[in-house]
Amino acid sequence: MKSIKILGVALVISLLAMVALACAADEPSAPAAPQQPQAAAPAAPAQAASQAAPAAPQQPAAPQAAAQAAPAITAVPVAPAPVLAPPTPVPTPVPEMAMESDWVAQYLASDGYKAEWGQPVRGNIVRYGANLRLNGHDPNYGHTYEGPQFLPTYNSLIKFDPWQGLTGPILPDLATTWDVSGDGKVVTFTLREDVKFQDNPYSTLPDEVQAAIMGRDFTCADAAASLQFAIYPPQSLKDVNVTHAGPRLGLKHMLDGGATCPDGPMGNTLRVEFSEARAGTIGKFAGVTGMPNNMPKELIDWVADGCGVGRADCFDQTDDKTYLYGTGTGAFIPFERVQDVGTKIRANPDYWREGLPFLEGVDHIEIEDTTTRFTALITGQVDYYGEGSASLLPGQVEQVLDSFADEIHLEPVLHLWGKGLQFNMHREPFNDERVRYAIHLGIDRDEWAEFNRIKDLVGVIRPTNWMPPGTVWALPDDELWALPGFRNGAGEKAEDIAEANRLLDEAGLTNSPRFTAGCMTTPQQIFVDGCLWFKDQLKKNLDIELNVDVVETAVQRQRGQTAHGVPPEYDVHYGSKARTDVADPSDFYNIFLVPDAESWYHRGTGRFQIDAERAQRLLDMANAQAVELDPEKRREIVHEIERESITAAYMIPMPWSIIWPAWHKDIRGWRMFNHPSQIKWSGWERMWLAR
């Protein structure tokens, strides 16, 4: 392959804070997980496709043991074997070793390959346990449970190596080279030649659309249309509330119409122009949510024109027919969807990476109940699950370690999301900074760490504010450990709780209970446990009554996904709040502090209404750090935002979660990494089953 040439080093020198893989990733079998996932390394220039991963600094100091463990909220029994739709039979012929190709040889020689995997085996179907029903297969979206069901249909321009994650190199995908102009405002991609869109015999697209796109060459016109569609969706999509938040958050500084084809629409040069130079631009192309999104231009035009039915949301309202609309250049094609059962993808026989994928396909089996899904794993009805909020729970991890370590591999990594408690500041008493800060002081984060402990292994990382722990953007551990609310020295938590109660008295909340509020969350146990834990803490330490309000996901969105400035319909909300895509500060600050990019998780919660001066100051700093190209100066701004956010207490971030993905040990060629962004699903093409 051609080497990668990157200009404009000032643009990319603070590309991202690299995050090292969990120690378990280097073990061939279910390992004893590390006390903490390995800390992140400082940012490094992304100057070549094969740049070496930087060494990681020392891990944060381990927290002291909590004086008292939180109540054991959740017991996780092994359920009886569930009644599921019969799984697709898995072919079991004599294993066929994968044919050699340049791509296979390259991957087997790469730093991410593990020798204990052996040689790839061709064929077989992996069964993945999806934790929620798929509703939306637009490649510009794709949460953890959605992404594997359709993102392998597509390719991005460039990507982080899915075997090495954010510590590894940025690799070519549909682009072979990329240059950044001296002023950092233009990125020019050279597109790969001889790449064709899939010719999917199962497609349900209208005949005229199929005739225009199936099996034809991928061109610059497609790449330019895909970027425009992602970042500036047409009004027809906005009319049905489709805004493509992921790519728009990462690359919203691209000019409207800024993706052009200087060599003509059929050429192989893509020019992308931005309004300003930003430090994280290249990293966003390589890993931001929704970037494996290259589609045929004719398909994009058909969607924008209403999908033939006068509504442009056919990729966002998934049914058994619309699921098969998906068409890209990727390793897998959509094959089947059955309502309330799951989806299937199958190998693209004409994939442009010769010799890939190894798998015949992947079946995604929708199992919403946590215990039933775990039982399906240990009884062999599914091969793999555990991403994001579908992570194995502490009790389930213990069961695997105790009883199934010979068959099932665990790979603990830091989650893409950090959990937290969001205040609706339109409602009293959360419009009072003293009340919010008192709650920050009054919870014992060490008890949360103990509640999430798995034997002698940690389940969360202390201390944590908004930025991912271990990255250069997080406040130094020695500073965080000394701050009220985070500190845990002898007698310090008692002092913090006393100060919290003094603030509540000062705010006039002197009744018993001081006040009653509801904690909205969804039925996944990982979220219910959060509300239950806050309920216990606030009652025990502050005499606040918190009722747990469990609602279905659709109701949560209805009550929380309000227009800008319109108050949400909850008191407090527990869930995934802080986040990162590529360990860049803007990954979170955009969705929390920047109104025109704000996520519904934080939208309309009242900071500009009840704390306008500080909210504006935080917004100004969030915008300033995004365009600061000097890494040290940028870090200073980020640290100031972190300090200001603690006293503002718009949201209470909890110690960052470790998730526990698990898969049967005959799955090979698959790795996880800290803060695993959606680009991990491009790794499906390298996975095989040793059966």
Image (cartoon, rainbow, N blue to C red):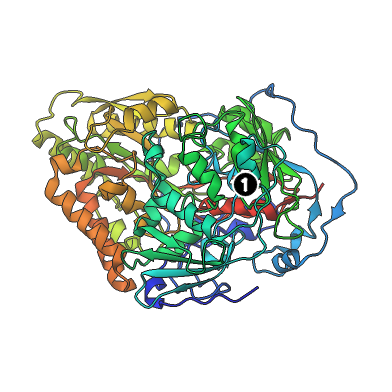
116 or 238: nearer the eye? 238
- In this view, the residue farthest toward the right is 94
Q: In the visual, does 9 lie left or right of 395?
A: left
166 or 653: nearer the eye? 166
For the N terminus, the quadrant is: bottom right
Residue at 62% over, 48% down: 152
Q: Is residue 508 above or below residue 17?
A: above
Residue 492 location in percent, x, y? 25, 49
418 or 66: nearer the eye? 418
SS of the residue under disc 1: helix
Residue 291 location in percent, x, y? 50, 53
Residue 468 location in percent, x, y? 40, 55
Q: Is residue 580 above or below residue 662?
A: below
Residue at 67% over, 22% down: 80
Quarter of the image where one finds residue 534:
top left
Residue 307 location in percent, x, y? 51, 35
Classify 10 Å Cα crowding around label 1: few (below 14), some (14-19), many (20 and above): few
Residue 149 seen from this side: no
Q: Which amino acid is tagged 1?
A: Ala
Quarter of the image where one finds residue 106:
bottom right
304 or 171: nearer the eye? 304
**Number of callouts:** 1
Q: Is residue 279 above or below residue 235?
A: below
Query: What residue is pinned by disc 1?
Result: 212
Q: In the visual, does 159 lie left or right of 79?
A: left
Residue 490 seen from this side: yes
